[in-house]
Image: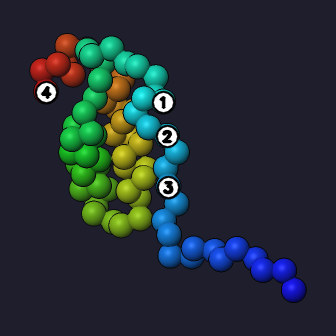
Amino acid sequence: MPLRPKRNEGAEPQATSTQADMPEASVGNMVSVEQIRLRAYEIYLERGEQPGGELDDWLQAERELESEPLSRAQAG
């Protein structure tokens, strides 16, 4: 009977993308992770602190912050 390689069931999947793989953005248009985190938390509070919408909150925060006028983004 041939031996099959053991599956490492406890291992977490590894991310294959790095920041080097991501397209470059101009410094003026960059939104920090902290800005997104804070806005996502505000969205969570606005929708009544109901669990289960974390990804949607994060994506909405990204969309809002990345579409802000440049002058407003630099003020924050």
Q: What amino acid is found at the position of numbered circle 1 in the picture?
A: Asp
**Rounded to the nearest whole Å, what is the CA distance between mark 1 and mark 3?**
15 Å
Q: What amino acid is found at the position of numbered circle 2 in the picture?
A: Ser
Label 1 close to label 3 by CB (< 8 Å): no
| Residue at the disc numbered 1 | 21
Q: Which of marks 1 and 3 is nearer the N terminus?
A: 3
**Residue at the image position 41 percent from the left and 65 percent from the top:** 52
Which of the 4 image quadrants contains residue 2?
A: bottom right
Judging from the image, what secondary structure is the residue with disc 3 in?
A: loop
**Rounded to the nearest whole Å, what is the CA distance between mark 4 and mark 3?**
34 Å
Structural crowding at the residue carrying mark 1, measured as other residues with C-alpha within 10 Å and reported as few (<14), some (14–19) or many (≥20) = few
Which one is in front, 21 or 66? 21
Q: Earlier in the sequence, mark 4 or mark 3?
A: 3
Quadrant where the image shows the C terminus: top left
Q: Is residue 70 above or below residue 47?
A: above
| Residue at the disc numbered 2 | 17
**Residue at the image position 76 percent from the left and 77 percent from the top:** 4
| Residue at the disc numbered 3 | 14
Q: Which is closer to the viewer, label 4 or label 3?
A: 3
Q: Which of marks 2 and 4 is nearer the N terminus?
A: 2
Label 1 close to label 2 by CB (< 8 Å): yes
| Residue at the disc numbered 4 | 76
Judging from the image, what secondary structure is the residue with disc 4 in?
A: loop
Which one is in front, 56 or 21? 21
Q: Is residue 52 above or below residue 28?
A: below
